[in-house]
């Protein structure tokens, strides 16, 4: 660990350890703490600052509120060959995915395609860490999560949908996987929170205030206002799809049904998640493997210097992470506090 | 059939018959002609004018150019329980889907989810007619098609992707299915063609001219220019996903590989199509059926007077279609022409 003026360089492993201690001290089982810590530190290392250590306050606050069970053990079952269910039992979605991962991958490889349905889960993290490992194993993954009522679909008059992220990962032969992950709102909630914390105004078109009027003030969006979907009616349609697919297929809550009013401090949406996994090794002729590398070559030939996921991939393994001294101090204090 | 000034009211059945005769006279088998006619007449009846009778010129021109085989018999095979392949043998994608439909639905119901991969296919139609019937059978369907190089992804300098439509259909208990279908470009190519034919200018942000400068002239976009994706980098990412998924999983061509230069008059993209089908009857607790009707009630409660697919659903069965006399005359002439 080295300290510069106002910032701290901490090794990725040390950051994971610090975060795991925080999660354990706030009611997480050792396994859950380790999964969350790897996720959160990995996001920070890859430059996903809205889902990195910035989220620790939200995790701690939610755990302390009793809204989420940090020691939950997920239950896995299946009623058909390619459809795997996990009941997260009011725990974290990442823990449910971790528990079901082996059987899900097996079902993808046996059947060519499979569906993982997670319900009763909390997801406060980025989605790309969920889908990227599938691409590293040669599989394609699409994931969707709904969240809490904070977005007004086109044609509606009040918030109804969540930020409803959509993520995709595909293996590229000899290259970094192609991975994207975005809120189907005009901006991710975490980025609005970051802007509010940093006192920045937002570009136009991101959201509305409590009276439904367009605003560039992140505080007005967060306090009684709402986001709008990206891309007009097309983005709105995708956000509707995420909402219906996730709540409908998992039996989890719709975003607008999330009611944490009895748990002050709760910030983790308690909904569901789906992942569609595809084994492209069945494809022919030529195969997905050949085609994927041709595709990236075509993108480069068309002048694209990068492609979705490449930047994160390149910086994630740099071994250490630079965070502000204020944040480092806050994390250290959390880790030292008595278990609640 | 009744004639008003400048327009003709023709029954849906009569229009299908007229269109089928046109397709047969231009080299389609009777089965293919019937499938295309139902698709094209159905789009016109549902108000999808960019994919209705407007497309007949393109179909005829493509068939006459020798670019597509209107009598092709698709070949179906499967290498894993939930992954069904169709080689369209240079025929129409709708014919390949029709041929594989029963086995694909069976695989969806047996496994919970299945993937249909169509390659060597031509798709000049709307996508919603492909996915809607799945919802009518209680299934969820997602479909993607790539097309021909006419769109510049964010970060690229020349056209590379197709209009790459994405479609979704889900059953809603007691209501019309929720169905959407959109080009992942800022506008569908058919709508740009319609605007050019009608002498309209386009809104800003749709495309660029041959020198890469933004333009609102549809002719400049169609002649050496290009479209751009909808929704900035998020829509661009979805369009990249469609391109990689479809060409990669089917073994069909990438949009930018479509080369019809040896077939003057060819207008049908010769690529591939995928459909992901899900059987939501496995979902629990409460089930997708309950949740779907709750979702529509929530949309209405939030002030949405309609939802994607509802308008088309309501008008599609009105029994007759009004088309311009000029178009009706053109269709009648096509139908009377000697088989090429």
Image (cartoon, coloured by chain):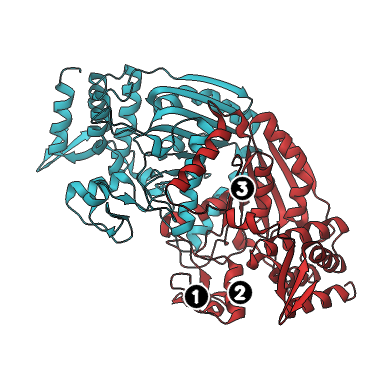
Chain colours: A cyan, B red
Q: Nearer the viewer, residue A90 or A313?
A: A90
- Residue B268 higher or lower than B167, as above or below: below
Q: Quadrant of the C terminus of chain B?
A: bottom right
Location of mark 3 (residue): B176
Check contact, mark 2 vs mark 1: CB within 8 A.
no
Location of mark 1 (residue): B202
Tell whether B2 sits left or right of B300: right
Rendered residue at 62%/57% (across/down)? B312
Tell whether A237 sits left or right of A322: right
> Where residue A138 sits: x, y (%)?
54, 37
- Give the numbered dot on residue A188: none
Disc nearer the start of the sequence (3/1): 3
**Which secondary structure, mark 2?**
helix
Disc nearer the start of the sequence (2/3): 3
- Foreground label between 2 and 3: 3
**Which secondary structure, mark 1?**
loop
Distance of label 3 from label 1 (alpha carbons): 32 Å
Q: Nearer the viewer, residue A242 or B91?
A: A242
Please state the chain letter of the residue tagged with numbered disc 3 in the rendered image: B
> Where residue A152 sits: x, y (%)?
39, 51
**Which secondary structure, mark 3?**
loop
> Where residue A127 sits: x, y (%)?
41, 39
- Residue B260 higher or lower than B281, as above or below: below
On the same chain, marks 2 and 1? The answer is yes
Disc nearer the start of the sequence (2/1): 2
Location of mark 2 (residue): B194
Please state the chain letter of the residue tagged with numbered disc 2 in the rendered image: B
> Where residue B85 sits: x, y (%)?
72, 43
Q: Is residue A323 visible?
A: yes
Distance of label 2 from label 3 (alpha carbons): 28 Å
Please state the chain letter of the residue tagged with numbered disc 1 in the rendered image: B
- Residue B197 higher or lower than A312, as above or below: below
């Amino acid at each position: 660990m080295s300290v510069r003026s106002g910032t701290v360089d901490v090794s990725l492993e040390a950051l994971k350890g610090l975060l795991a201690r925080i999660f354990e001290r706030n009611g997480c089982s050792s396994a859950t703490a380790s999964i969350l810590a790897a996720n959160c530190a990995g996001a920070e290392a890859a430059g996903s600052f809205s889902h990195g250590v910035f989220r620790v306050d939200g995790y701690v606050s939610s755990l302390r509120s009793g809204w989420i069970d940090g020691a939950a053990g997920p239950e896995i079952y299946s009623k058909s060959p390619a459809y795997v269910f996990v009941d997260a039992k009011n725990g974290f979605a990442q823990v449910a995915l971790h528990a079901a991962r082996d059987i899900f991958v097996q079902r993808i490889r046996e059947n060519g395609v499979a569906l993982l349905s997670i319900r009763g889960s909390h997801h406060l993290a980025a989605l790309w860490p969920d889908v990227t490992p599938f691409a590293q194993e040669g599989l394609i993954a699409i994931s969707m999560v709904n969240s809490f009522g904070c977005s007004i679909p086109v044609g509606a008059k009040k918030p109804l949908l969540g930020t409803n992220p959509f993520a995709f990962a595909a293996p590229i032969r000899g290259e970094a996987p192609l991975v994207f992950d975005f809120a189907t709102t005009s901006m991710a909630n975490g980025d609005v929170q970051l802007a509010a914390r940093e006192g920045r105004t937002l570009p136009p078109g991101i959201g509305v205030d409590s009276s439904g009027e367009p605003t560039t003030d992140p505080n007005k969006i967060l306090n009684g206002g709402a986001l709008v979907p990206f891309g007009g009616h097309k983005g709105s349609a995708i956000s509707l799809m995420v909402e219906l697919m996730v709540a409908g297929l998992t039996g989890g809550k719709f975003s607008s049904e999330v009611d944490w009013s009895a748990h002050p401090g709760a910030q983790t949406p308690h909904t569901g998640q789906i992942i569609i996994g595809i084994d492209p090794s069945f494809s022919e002729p030529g195969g997905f493997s050949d085609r994927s590398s041709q595709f990236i070559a075509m993108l480069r030939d068309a002048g694209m210097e990068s492609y979705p996921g490449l930047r994160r991939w390149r910086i994630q393994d740099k071994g250490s992470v630079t965070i502000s001294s204020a944040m480092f101090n806050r994390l250290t204090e959390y880790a030292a506090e008595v278990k609640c």
